[in-house]
Image (cartoon, grey):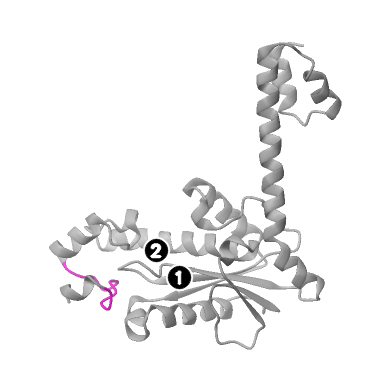
Amino acid sequence: MKINEIKAKLNNNPTSEFIESLKDDSRKGVQTLLKQYQKRVARQEKLENDYEKRMQYERRFWQSGKQNIAGIDEVGRGPLAGPVVAAAVILPHDFHEIEVNDSKQLTSKVRKQLYQIILDKAISIGIGIGSSKLIDKVNIYEATKITMKNAVRNLTVVPDQLIIDAMSINTEISQLKLIKGDAKSVSVSAASIVAKEFRDSLMCAYAEKYPGYDFEKNVGYGTKKHLAGLAQLGITPIHRQSFSPVTKYK
């Protein structure tokens, strides 16, 4: 069999017998293809195993009789401008997208692809938005809790259980506070992706409304261009006036 034919077969669910036969093929090109295939298989197996670990909390709650589990996460606690955004996501029991993980561990391209998949497949998604005014009024920690609670309220399905990334909120719904939950629970991972993509789109819209701060790239964080914009143009209505160094431009 020619090497290009072997390559094509390796890309099309080869049988174990075929893989075994390649081990005895002395051609260097064949052995290179075999090693590449084995690496792909090992990577896929790791993704599957890691995904199953991130599903352990959901499966445990499902087995206890709780059907609708909402993962909750937020994004935007650190920026100098823009809202803090929280997402609550309820996934179906047959959800199986093994690349869904903490949004910070994903490339922009993969995150955008997964965002669309989550929107299509989720049972319900709720969004909460905490404005810069709310942040200045109650502080970022309290604003985050309010925003998370509003995300839960905006779900179209009432959850039986919440899994929240490193926070607790005021609700009668049973909740699990999970440190680094966006890397330990698929539902929280999905919420982190939704919150990130939703907030990024908001900041791109604000970039058009308030040019000169590079919001489309820094999404409100205090980058060099953002600070230069503050110095030259002053603060906008979406700046957090209680945050340094924004306070000195009030």
Q: Amino acid at mark 1?
A: Val
Q: Amino acid at mark 2?
A: Leu
Q: Which quadrant of the structure image shows residue 189?
A: bottom right
Number of numbered callouts drawn: 2
Check disc 1 and report the residue beneath it. Answer: 85
**Dominant secondary structure of the residues highlighted in magenta in the image:** loop
Check disc 2 and report the residue beneath it. Answer: 202
Cβ atoms under marks 1 and 2 closer than 8 Å: yes
Q: Nearer the viewer, residue 141 or 161?
A: 141
Residue range highlighted in magenta: 234-243
- Residue at the far right in the pictured view: 17
Query: Which image quarter is the C terminus in?
Result: bottom left
Q: Position of residue 62 (x, y in %)?
A: 78, 70
Residue 89 against residue 149 in the figure, above or below: above
- Residue at 70% of width from left, 16% of height from top? 30
Residue 175 against residue 78 in the figure, above or below: below
Q: Position of residue 140 (x, y in %)?
A: 39, 78
- Residue at 55% of width from left, 83% of height from top? 169
